Image (cartoon, grey):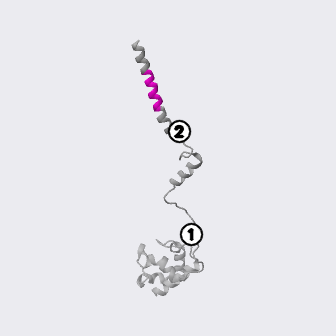
Amino acid sequence: MAEQHSSKRIMWATIGVAAVLIAIIYPLTVKNPGSAADASKGNDEADVRIQPVARFELAKAAPVASGPKDAATIYNSVCGACHNSGAAGAPKIDDKGAWAPRVATGKEALYKSALGGKNAMPPKGGAADLSDDEIKATVDYILGKVK
């Protein structure tokens, strides 16, 4: 009989420990209506917390002031990059000897080279947005410097 009392005691002790554990663990696992896991409020808060640090957007550049550009400005911003330093075999602006054979071909040949490109020089010196008249005016500007 003593054995029956001891096994009953073990059974009740086990049930008591299980009830205490359930009483402690259950409140920790149940969602509270005011918790961050609440669907109506928690998603907004989570979206705010996980926002990127920066954003990148592509947008069209503002239009540049329209109207013709003067030849000196075009030379300094486009042509001078190569013709001031002699890069890619371009004749330097101050080397009259290098320009002499080119000047001898005439303005029309120089216009054609500037508009269509020659050797390493791309058409219009790489500034496709320039008009033919602007390129011709710039060629005239360069000829004024090399003669």
Tally of numbered discs = 2
The amino acid sitting under disc 2 is Val
Kindly report the secondary structure that dominates the magenta region of the rendered protein.
helix
Q: Give the vertical position of 2 relative to 130 (above or below).
A: above
Q: Nearer the viewer, residue 146 or 34?
A: 34
Corner quadrant of residue 33: top right
Q: Secondary structure at mark 1?
A: loop
Q: Residue 104: x and y, percent? A: 48, 84
Relative placement, left or right, of 107 versus 81 is right
Tell me, yes or no, if residue 114 can be seen here: yes
Of residue 103 and residue 39, the one placed in the foreground of this image is 39
- Residue on which disc 1 sits: 61
Q: Is residue 48 magenta?
A: no
> What is the distance, in whole Å, between disc 1 and disc 2 at their CAs?
54 Å
Range of residues picked out in magenta: 10-21
* Residue at left offset 50%, top offset 35%: 26
- Mark whose residue sits in front, 1 or 2: 2
100 w.r.t. 18: above or below: below
Residue 85, percent from left and from top? 40, 77
Left or right: 55, with 90 as reference point:
right
